[in-house]
Image (cartoon, grey):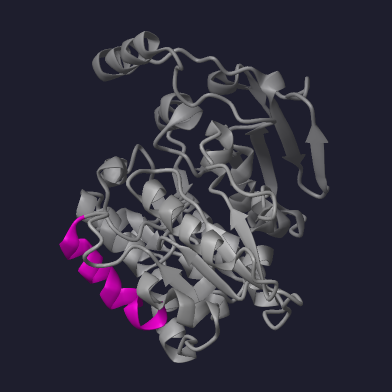
Amino acid sequence: MRILIHGSERPLHIQQFIPLMKLLDSNPNSEYIFFQSKSDLPIQPTNKLFHRIRDFCWDRFNYARNSFNPKDWRWIWKQKGQGPNKLESPAEQWEFPCPPTKSNIPWKPDLVIGTTPHEGHMRYQLIPWASKNNIPILSIDHGAPMVPYSFGNYRGSMMGCTANAVWGEVSKTINTGYGAPSTGQIITGSPTLDELSSMDVSKKTSRKQILLMTTHREPLKSAMDSMMERVIEQYISNTEFEIVVKPHPVELIRGTLQKLPQEIRIITEQGDLHACMQAAHCIVSPATSVIIPALAMGIPFVNILQPGSGLTDEKELQILNQHIGLATFTPEQLEDVVEGRLTPDPNECKIAFERLGYKADGQNAARVLHLAKHIVLGNEPDTWTDPFN
């Protein structure tokens, strides 16, 4: 199976693909090309007029200017019987034309895999090309929606993909609620969770870490910023605790992270996400994808996305609370959680995790690749069954 893997314009998305490539690298018969931008690249035209022109041309003529420069991307080539080879640019001996990358690739892919079919180069260049060449496309959901938001309407479309590998049952339900066909939403669990199966969740630091995890979308951002101010004011002088902030990557890209006291430790590397969560005494955050590994590790989680908060549709907040309410805590319980008077019920964490994240057995990347092979063989995505279940 020859796979073309689109790593996106965001290097942070490498976490989706590292587990896949490790498995492919261990298989002498596997072949793949992986390409990803060397740094964060614009996903949309920065000029508002050019943005509108792009949208007009796309809506009317299905055309978008291709600004791809192969030198801005890093490449990994895995040949049959060999290990992965890192390249600075497409190899001269490649012969199969690939207009989206303004270069050749070594062969016609059996499958395209990516995680950003809703935006940027994958949406406007790679997917149309693959569809025209009858190449199936498998999307890996890079995040797990907890509740529907207006900015998530793109989830109602398959965006030209053959199938979308989702984190769990809740993600599938929300995507189909937007309008996406349920037959295309396939529950595999996220490959990013695979490392959890080998982590030492008992390891903690000498000072109890209060981990604050930010977000970049309103109104959640302002609500979380206010919660951070509350935590910092209350615990910054208490030497028993260390306050650690893990900003959302988009906050770092846009420079929107609020100014923090110098005593606060800021984690900027996305690859450190699970390690810093594992070290935490407790986590304070809106319920986003980060709640899933927290539930798997049984870490106390104070969720600001509560019924009555006004942060999104009240009915949806009630549904979310049914999924995770017994495994998490409210902002009113913050002090009891931080100071150790409240701890989560391990069984409730397990139940909530399975709804949201499906599996943390180290096999999610293998599930995605098994689904990929199933699709390449011409089978309908919804006839796939989990070989590890």
Q: Main secondary structure of the magenta part?
A: helix
**The quarter of the displayed image where residue 328 is located:** bottom left
Instruction: Indicate the position of residue 81 as horizontal and vertical percent values.
Output: 81, 50
Give the residue at x 49% y 66%.
284
Can you tell which quarter of the image residue 355 is in? bottom left
The residue drawn where x is 41% and y is 60% is: 286
Q: Is residue 62 left or right of residue 348?
A: left
Q: Nearer the viewer, residue 230 or 304?
A: 230
251 relative to 305 in the view: left or right = right
Q: Residue at x 31, y 45 (%)?
A: 152
Taking the image as drawn, is residue 309 in sight? yes
Query: 93 or 275, which lies in front?
Result: 275
What residue is at 27 percent from the left and 49 percent from the top? 149
Instruction: Work out whether residue 152 or residue 253 is closer to the camera in this orientation and state it.
Output: 253
Please provide percent x and percent y for residue 341.
Answer: 50, 89
Q: Is residue 330 above or below residue 165?
A: below
The part of the image, by quadrant, that contains residue 265 is bottom right
Question: Vertically, is 18 above or below 337?
Answer: above
The image shows a total of numbered marks equal to 0
Instruction: From this view, report whether residue 251 is shown above or below residue 273.
Output: above
Q: Position of residue 82 (x, y in %)?
A: 83, 47
Residue 317 in the magenta stretch? The answer is: yes
Evaluate whether residue 359 shows in this view. no
The magenta stretch is 313-328
Check residue 35 for magenta coloring.
Answer: no
Residue most extreme to the left: 315
- Residue 43 picture location, percent across and down: 49, 26
